[in-house]
C-alpha cells in the first residue's frame, strides 16, 4: 500500500538532494568558495577515479557491518546508539589478542582475532541489552553512556598497558599499539589501493543476516518481538532473551567493524579508529529501510558522501564545519522526503492548501 | 425557519462519498434525521457507519456530497464546527481525562469559558441537567472513580451541557450491563421526547427494535435499506445487513463432558496497578464443556485469561491443566500443554500488525515441522498453510503477504481464530471473541466454538454478551470485582439474575 513508482521515488530523492545542495551553496558562497567547483569535487570525485571508487568502498565496509548490527537491534525492538563504543571495545580486544599471539599462523590468527572482537563488542552491547530486558533501563541512555566509558577505557589502554614499546623508547608517546603481525592482516583486494577483503566479508555477512532474520525461527521470533512485544510474549516467545540476544549480535557486528578497520587499514589500534562510523551506521541502517540488503547501497551512498565531503574540502578549502553541515543537510532532506514516497497524497494535500484558501461555501455549491 | 411543517428533517446527508486508498468507505450514502426521533444505523464491520458519523462531526472530509442542518447547507471542518451546529458524539472509547473531575471534563475545551471558570455555577447546572434526565452523576467526582456506565453518562451530559440536540451514540451499550442498557434507553426516550434527535450505531437487533424509530442499513458504504422500525423485524434486518439468512439459534449437540482439562484452585492475582484483581477463584472445565464468564468489563476477566495462559503470575492458588501443575510457568509451556488463546486485544496482542497474514497465521506453529526443521523456516509451507486457513476460515485478504494491519477488525479476528483453533489441543481460552463483529462473523465465531466443544475440547469463553453465553456456554460463571458470584447452568440462567450478579448482588436461593 502507498508505494510510489520507482521513477517517482528517484524524482523525490533527486529533488531532496538538490534542495539540500542549494542551501549548502549559500553556505559555500558565504565562505567565499565556488559552489560549482565544490559540488563537482563532492559528487564526481568519489566515482571518477580508481582512488575514488576504492576509497568509497573502504568507507562502505565498516558502515555495512555497523548497520547490520543496528538492523538486528531495531528489528528486535531495541535502539542501539552505542555502536561507536562497541567498535572501540571490539577493536581493543581483538588487537590485544592478536598482539598476544603474534606467532600463530594467519589461518588461525585472523579468524580468531575477528571472533574475539565480535565477542567483546557483543559483551559491550549485551550489557545494555540485559539492563533493558530485565531491569527496564532505557537502552538509548545506557548505550550512549557506555560509549563514553569505552572511549576513555581505550584511551587509557593505548596510553598505558597496550602502548607501542617503540613509542615509549623513542619518547614520542603517541597513543597507539604496536603493529599487529602481518599474518593477521586482511589482504588487499587491489594492489596500490587500500581496498581490502573486509568488503567481501561485509557483503557475505549482509546475506547471512538476511537469511537469519527472515529464514530462521530465531530471526522470526526476534522480529515479532520488535514488531509487537505483547504479541510475541503471548505467542510463547521469551521476550527478554530475544532482546538480550539482539543487543549481543548488534554489539558483535560493531566490534567486528572496529577490528576490520584495524586489520584492513591501520594494522594497529589507535585513538579515534571508530571515526564516527558508529553513528553514521545508524543513518545507513535507516536509509537502507532496516533491511540487511538495503544497507549495502545505503552504505555505498553514504561512503561516497563522506569521501565526497573530504574531496570537496580539499578542492575549495572551506572549513570542515561547512562540509559537515552540507552532509547533514543532505541526510535531513533525504530522510524528510521519505513521507512523499510513503504517502502518495501528501504532496497534493500540501499544495492544495496553498492554492485554495478556505472560504465559505456558496449555497448553490456545485457538487460534481 | 420552518414553522408549520413538523416533519422536516433536522439533518440530511446527501450523496456522501468517501474514499480511502483502495477502499470506498461511503458510496453516495444518504441520511435523514427528524427532530424527536431516533435513527439506528445498522451494518456489518467495515460497512461505513463510523466513517459516515466521523464525517458528520468533522473528523473526516467527504470527497463528495452535502450536509444540511435545519435545511441549510453546512461545511463541517472540525468537531468544533459540529458542536456549533448542535451535533455531538459519544465515541466507543470515551474521551475523558481520568484525573479530572466530572465538571472539569464537561467544560474542557469549551470556547466561551472565562479565564477562571465559576465551577460552582458549572456544578449547579450539571446537577440541574442530571436531575432532569435522571443521569445521576456527582460533578465533583473524579472520572477514575466512576464505573463505565457512569462515564458514559458524563459523556452524554457533556453533550447536553453544550447544547447538542443531535446526539450520535456509537455502540453505546457494548460496555453496559443489561440494567444499565435499559437505563440508557429511558434517557434516550426522554431526550427525544423533548425534541432532540439521536443517531444510534449498533450491531444488536433487539436494541434497534427497542430504541429506534427508523433504521438505515449500510452495506459496503451504501444505504441499502430504509425501514420504519415498526414495520420490520430482527430477521429481516439481519438479512438486509449480511445479505443472507442468519441463524439466531445455533445447533448445540449433546456432548458428555469428559476429563477435567482446566482447574483453578483458589487463584489470586493482581492487576497492572498492583491491586488485587482475582480473589480466590476456583473453577473446573471438562472436555466437551464450555464455561462462560459473564461480567462487566474490568472485573477481572482480562487477568483471569492471562493467568490461565501464563501471561500473568498468580500470587496464590494453583493452575492445573490436564492434572499437571502449571502454576506460574512461562507461556510457552502452557502453549505446549495444548492451550490456545483468543485474546481480547486483537491488534496489540493477538496479531503483529506489521507482519504478513501468513506470518501471523504461523505464530503458533513455526516451532515445529512442517513449518521449520531445526532453526530453518520453510516459507513455502507456511504460505501453503496460510492459503488453506484463509480459504477454510474465509479470511478476506488481498494476499497472504498483506500486512495484517490492513485487514478489517473482523478479518483479523478470523485469522486469530484460525490460528488458535488449528493449534488447539485441549483448552481454548476465548476472550470477547465476537466483540465488534457483525452478525455474520459472530455466527461463524460461535459455530467454531461449538465445533471445538463437539470435538471434546474445553472452552473458557469470556464474553460481555449474555445471549452469546446463554446460547453457547454450558455453564455461566459471573465475575464481579475479581470474585465468582456464582456458577449457573446456562439452561437455568436468566438475564435478570445474571444482570444482578454482574452488579454485585448475591442471588438469593
Image (cartoon, rainbow, N blue to C red):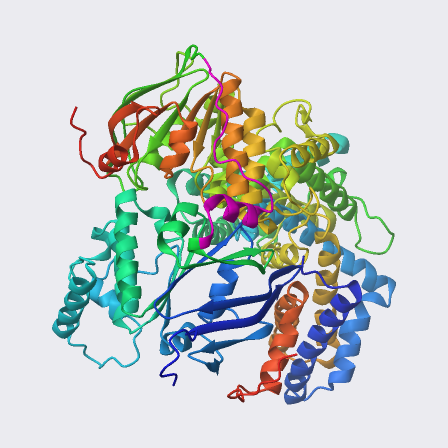
Is B51 situated left or right of A164 in this image?
A: left
Residue A274 found in image quarter:
bottom right
Image quadrant for the C terminus of chain A?
bottom right
Residue A317: % across, % down? 70, 80
Is residue A163 visible to the viewer in this orientation of the structure?
Answer: no
Does the magenta run of residues contain B3? no
Relative to A125, is A340 above or below?
A: below
The N terminus of chain A lies in which quarter of the figure? bottom right
Residue toward you, B401 or A287: B401
Residue ID at (47%, 68%): B32
- Answer above or below: position of A364 versus A80: below
What is the x, y in percent for residue B509?
Answer: 17, 23
Where is residue B216? Give x, y as percent.
50, 59
Query: Which picture quadrant has residue A120?
Result: top right
Q: Main secondary structure of the magenta part?
A: loop
The front one of A108 and A292 is A292
The relative height of residue B418 versus residue A72 in the rendered view (above or below) is above
The percent coordinates of residue B187 (x first, y second) are: 26, 58
A303 vs A137, left or right, is right
The region drawn magenta spans: B231-255
Residue shown at the point (50%, 67%) measured from the top left: B31
Amino acid at each position: 500500500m502507498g508505494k510510489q513508482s520507482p521513477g517517482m521515488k528517484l524524482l523525490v530523492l533527486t529533488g531532496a538532494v538538490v534542495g539540500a545542495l542549494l542551501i549548502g551553496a549559500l553556505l559555500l558562497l558565504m565562505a567565499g568558495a565556488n559552489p560549482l567547483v565544490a559540488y563537482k569535487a563532492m559528487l564526481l570525485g568519489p566515482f571518477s577515479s580508481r582512488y575514488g571508487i576504492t576509497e568509497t568502498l573502504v568507507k562502505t565496509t565498516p558502515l555495512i557491518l555497523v548497520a547490520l548490527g543496528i538492523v538486528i537491534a531495531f528489528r528486535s525492538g531495541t535502539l542501539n546508539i552505542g555502536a561507536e563504543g562497541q567498535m572501540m571495545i571490539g577493536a581493543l580486544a581483538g588487537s590485544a589478542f592478536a598482539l598476544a599471539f603474534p606467532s600463530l599462523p594467519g589461518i588461525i590468527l585472523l579468524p580468531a582475532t575477528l571472533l574475539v572482537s565480535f565477542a567483546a563488542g557483543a559483551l559491550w552491547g549485551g550489557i545494555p541489552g540485559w539492563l533493558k530486558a530485565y531491569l527496564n533501563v532505557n537502552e538509548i541512555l545506557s548505550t550512549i553512556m557506555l560509549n563514553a566509558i569505552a572511549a576513555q577505557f581505550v584511551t587509557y589502554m593505548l596510553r598505558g598497558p597496550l602502548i607501542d614499546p617503540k613509542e615509549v623508547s623513542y619518547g614520542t608517546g603517541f597513543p597507539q599499539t604496536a603493529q599487529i603481525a602481518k599474518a593477521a592482516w586482511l589482504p588487499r583486494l587491489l594492489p596500490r589501493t587500500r581496498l581490502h577483503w573486509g568488503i567481501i566479508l561485509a557483503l557475505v555477512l549482509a546475506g547471512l543476516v538476511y537469511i537469519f532474520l527472515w529464514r530462521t525461527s530465531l530471526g522470526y521470533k526476534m522480529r515479532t518481538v520488535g514488531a509487537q512485544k505483547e504479541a510475541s510474549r503471548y505467542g510463547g516467545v521469551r521476550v527478554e532473551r530475544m532482546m538480550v540476544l539482539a543487543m549481543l549480535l548488534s554489539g558483535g557486528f560493531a566490534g567486528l567493524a572496529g577490528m576490520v578497520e584495524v586489520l584492513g587499514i591501520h594494522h594497529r589500534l589507535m585513538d579515534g579508529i571508530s571515526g564516527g562510523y558508529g553513528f553514521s551506521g545508524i543513518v545507513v541502517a535507516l536509509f537502507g529501510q532496516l533491511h540487511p540488503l538495503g544497507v549495502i547501497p545505503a552504505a555505498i551512498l553514504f561512503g561516497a558522501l563522506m569521501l565526497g565531503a573530504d574531496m570537496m574540502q580539499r578542492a575549495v578549502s572551506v572549513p570542515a564545519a561547512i562540509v559537515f553541515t552540507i552532509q547533514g543537510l543532505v541526510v535531513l532532506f533525504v530522510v524528510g522526503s521519505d513521507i512523499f514516497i510513503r504517502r502518495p497524497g501528501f504532496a497534493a494535500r500540501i499544495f492544495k492548501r496553498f492554492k485554495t484558501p478556505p472560504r465559505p461555501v456558496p449555497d448553490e455549491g456545485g457538487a460534481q | 425557519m420552518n414553522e408549520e411543517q413538523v416533519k422536516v428533517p433536522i439533518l440530511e446527508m446527501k450523496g456522501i462519498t468517501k474514499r480511502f486508498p483502495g477502499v470506498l468507505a461511503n458510496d453516495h450514502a444518504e441520511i435523514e434525521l427528524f427532530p424527536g426521533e431516533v435513527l439506528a444505523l445498522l451494518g456489518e464491520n467495515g460497512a461505513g457507519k463510523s466513517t459516515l458519523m466521523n464525517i458528520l462531526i468533522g473528523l473526516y472530509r467527504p470527497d463528495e456530497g452535502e450536509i444540511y442542518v435545519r435545511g441549510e447547507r453546512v461545511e463541517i471542518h472540525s468537531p468544533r464546527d459540529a458542536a456549533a451546529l448542535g451535533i455531538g458524539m459519544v465515541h466507543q472509547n470515551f474521551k475523558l481525562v481520568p484525573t479530572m473531575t466530572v465538571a472539569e471534563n464537561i467544560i474542557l475545551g469549551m470556547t466561551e469559558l472565562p479565564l477562571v471558570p465559576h465551577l460552582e455555577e458549572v456544578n449547579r447546572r450539571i446537577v440541574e441537567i442530571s436531575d432532569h434526565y435522571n443521569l445521576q452523576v456527582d460533578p465533583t467526582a473524579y472520572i477514575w472513580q466512576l464505573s463505565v456506565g457512569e462515564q458514559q453518562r458524563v459523556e452524554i451530559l457533556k453533550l447536553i451541557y453544550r447544547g447538542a440536540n443531535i446526539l450520535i451514540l456509537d455502540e453505546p451499550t457494548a460496555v453496559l450491563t443489561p440494567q444499565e442498557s435499559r437505563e440508557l434507553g429511558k434517557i434516550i426516550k426522554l431526550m427525544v421526547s423533548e425534541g432532540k434527535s439521536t443517531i444510534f450505531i449498533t450491531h444488536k437487533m433487539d436494541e434497534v427494535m427497542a430504541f429506534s424509530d427508523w433504521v438505515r442499513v449500510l452495506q459496503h458504504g451504501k444505504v441499502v435499506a430504509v425501514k420504519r422500525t415498526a414495520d420490520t423485524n430482527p430477521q429481516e434486518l439481519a438479512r438486509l445487513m449480511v445479505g443472507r439468512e442468519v441463524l439466531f439459534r445455533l445447533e448445540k449437540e449433546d456432548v458428555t463432558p469428559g476429563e477435567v482439562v482446566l482447574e483453578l484452585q483458589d487463584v489470586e492475582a493482581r492487576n497492572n496497578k498492583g491491586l488485587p484483581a482475582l480473589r480466590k477463584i476456583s473453577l473446573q472445565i471438562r472436555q466437551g464443556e464450555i464455561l462462560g464468564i459473564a461480567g462487566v468489563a474490568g472485573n477481572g476477566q482480562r487477568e483471569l485469561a492471562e493467568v490461565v495462559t501464563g501471561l500473568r503470575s498468580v500470587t496464590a492458588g494453583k493452575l492445573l491443566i490436564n492434572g499437571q501443575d502449571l502454576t506460574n510457568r512461562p507461556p510457552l509451556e502452557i502453549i505446549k500443554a495444548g492451550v490456545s488463546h483468543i485474546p481480547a486485544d486483537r491488534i496489540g496482542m493477538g496479531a503483529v500488525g506489521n507482519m504478513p497474514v501468513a506470518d501471523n497465521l504461523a505464530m503458533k506453529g513455526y516451532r515445529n515441522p512442517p513449518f521449520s526443521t531445526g532453526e530453518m523456516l520453510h516459507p513455502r509451507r507456511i504460505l501453503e498453510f496460510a492459503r488453506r486457513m484463509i480459504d477454510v476460515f474465509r479470511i478476506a485478504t488481498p494476499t497472504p503477504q498483506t500486512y495484517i494491519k490492513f485487514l478489517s477488525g473482523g478479518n483479523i479476528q478470523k485469522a486469530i481464530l484460525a490460528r488458535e483453533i488449528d493449534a488447539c489441543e485441549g483448552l481454548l481460552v476465548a476472550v470477547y471473541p465476537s466483540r465488534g463483529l457483525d452478525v455474520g462473523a459472530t455466527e461463524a465465531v460461535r459455530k467454531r466454538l461449538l465445533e471445538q466443544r463437539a470435538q471434546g475440547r474445553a472452552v473458557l469463553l469470556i464474553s460481555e454478551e449474555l445471549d452469546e453465553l446463554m446460547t453457547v456456554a454450558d455453564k455461566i460463571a459471573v465475575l464481579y470485582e475479581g470474585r465468582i458470584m456464582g456458577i449457573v447452568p446456562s439452561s437455568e440462567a436468566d438475564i435478570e439474575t445474571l444482570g444482578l450478579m454482574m452488579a454485585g448482588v448475591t442471588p438469593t436461593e
